Image (cartoon, helix red, strand yellow):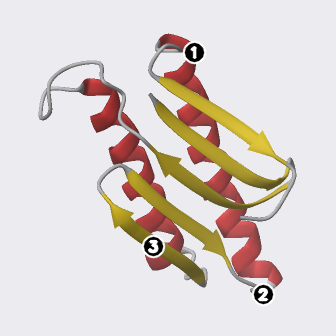
Amino acid sequence: MITVRISGTPGRLSGMIFEGHADFAQYGEDIICSAVTAQLMMAYNGLSQIAKAPMASAQLESGWFLFRLLPMSPEKQAKAQLIMQTLKMGLENIQTLYEDHINVITNEMEV
């Protein structure tokens, strides 16, 4: 199962940790892993290249990725929050369809 831990408050998300594999299908054919990875990479690239949001990130192994927003100007924060909220919504939609393969947890704490 993929577990996504989202940190921050409802109005100000601050980071996410992605862990695990969906185990929906064989490697290379798993549509859930593909969907989650595509959304993660789209949002991560949007945060860094469009919003120019300062972030800390790490990928220690396959099936594990963390990123955290760093302090930024109000203008960048507003753009970053749009992207973060969109990513959260997309992940929750995948969870609605495939609840046995992805668990999205929102904690009001910092990553």
Kindly identify the amino acid type of the residue bearing the numbered disc 3.
Answer: Ala
Name the residue nearer the viewer: 16 or 89: 16
Disc 3: which residue: 58
- Which amino acid type is shown beneath numbered disc 1? Thr
Q: Earlier in the sequence, mark 3 or mark 1?
A: 3
Q: Nearer the viewer, mark 2 or mark 3?
A: 3
Residue labelled with disc 1: 96
Residue at the (55%, 82%) spot, across then down: 52
Q: Position of residue 22 (x, y in %)?
A: 36, 28
Where is residue 70 shown, x and y percent of the image? 70, 82
Q: Secondary structure at mark 1?
A: helix
Give the amino acid type for the residue marked by disc 2 in the picture. Ser
User: Looking at the image, is mark 2 or mark 1 nearer the viewer?
Assistant: 1
Tag 2 secondary structure: loop
> Neighbour class for label 1 at 10 Å: few (<14), some, many (≥20)?
few
Q: Residue 111 at x, y = what percent?
A: 71, 64
First in sequence: mark 2 vs mark 3: 3
Quadrant of residue 81 in the image? bottom right
Quarter placement of the N terminus: top left
- Mark number, residue 73: 2
Counting from the top left corner in percent of width and height, residue 83 is at 60, 57
Q: Are marks 2 and 1 in contact (CB under 8 Å)?
A: no
- The one of 69 and 25 positioned closer to us in this rendering: 25
Q: Nearer the viewer, residue 44 or 100?
A: 100
